[in-house]
Amino acid sequence: MYKTFYGFREKPFSKTPDPRFLYMSVGHREALARLQYVLEEREIAILTGDIGCGKTTISRALMDTMGDVYHFCFIFNPRLSAVEFLRVIAANLGVEKPSTAKDFLLGEITQALYDLHENGRCLVVVVDEAQLIPDREIFDEIRLLTNFQLDDQNLLSIIIMGQPELRRIVSVPLFEPFRQRVAMAYHLLPLTLEETQEYLDFRMIVAGGGAGLFAPDAVQRIYELTGGVPRKINTLATNALLTGFAKDLAWIDATVIEDIKSELII
């Protein structure tokens, strides 16, 4: 396939959130640095951004960079009741058969958190797609989880990630108690035109190839069609490489992008 033709060891524009392929734009660097700080301070953070901007990949990179001191619990589907939400956390902490009664369940979580602390570790709860949380009660439980603390520090950190509407959801007055517990709220923007060029080259180099395969006019067109959203860039770039391979092209220019744009739903 096109990997051998263009000299790649692996696919450069896979959609899986592999931290090796995380291109650190200015926004991504700032988001990662802020999340690292929130973990060190054991607070709550909100990270928002459009679909495909790299929020999940940043969370994976965060896990890789923070080391074994932090125990991560990822919740990818937050369409849960409050008790189900707490049971997921309890199970992640190693509680066998978490209770279905909330009072017992909180006791199990408390003991597990203290045990984790005794072993020199801190829980990090990462809630993805948080705009889908169906009930305000879950936000209350997230807020109350920060009550698990010692005299000088919390026993866990919480990162809540979602699409831009998450910010609107938590902005209403009913969420004021929750907002007061949030230490950092950062919005991740799409890539600029210059960053789109760097993103394409970076991922091709990580995949074992070289930079400069996409001509400047192709990069310009990719940027215009995708708005700088990495996931959309991946889709368009992959189809461009497939077309280039089929046509035996050593250089991807804007005509290739024009040829494939009508085939894509991006």
Image (cartoon, rainbow, N blue to C red):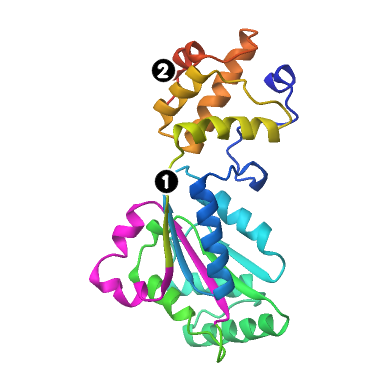
| Residue at 59% across, 84% down | 108
**What span is in magenta?**
154-183
Residue 66 part of the magenta segment:
no
Residue 95 placement, left or right of 37: right
Residue occupied by mark 2: 262
User: Residue 4: percent from the left, percent from the top?
Assistant: 75, 20
Amino acid type of the residue that numbered disc 2 sits on in the rendered structure = Ser
Q: CA distance from mark 2 to mark 1?
A: 26 Å
Image quarter of the C terminus? top left
Q: At 42% across and 58% down in the image, what residue appears?
A: 186
Query: For numbered disc 2, what is the local secondary structure?
Result: loop
Q: Residue at x 72, y 67 (%)?
A: 68
Q: Nearer the viewer, mark 2 or mark 1?
A: 1
When the figure is inspected, residue 134 is found, relative to residue 54, above or below; the finding is below
The answer to whether residue 79 is left or right of residue 9 is: left
Residue 167 within the magenta-colored segment of the rendering: yes
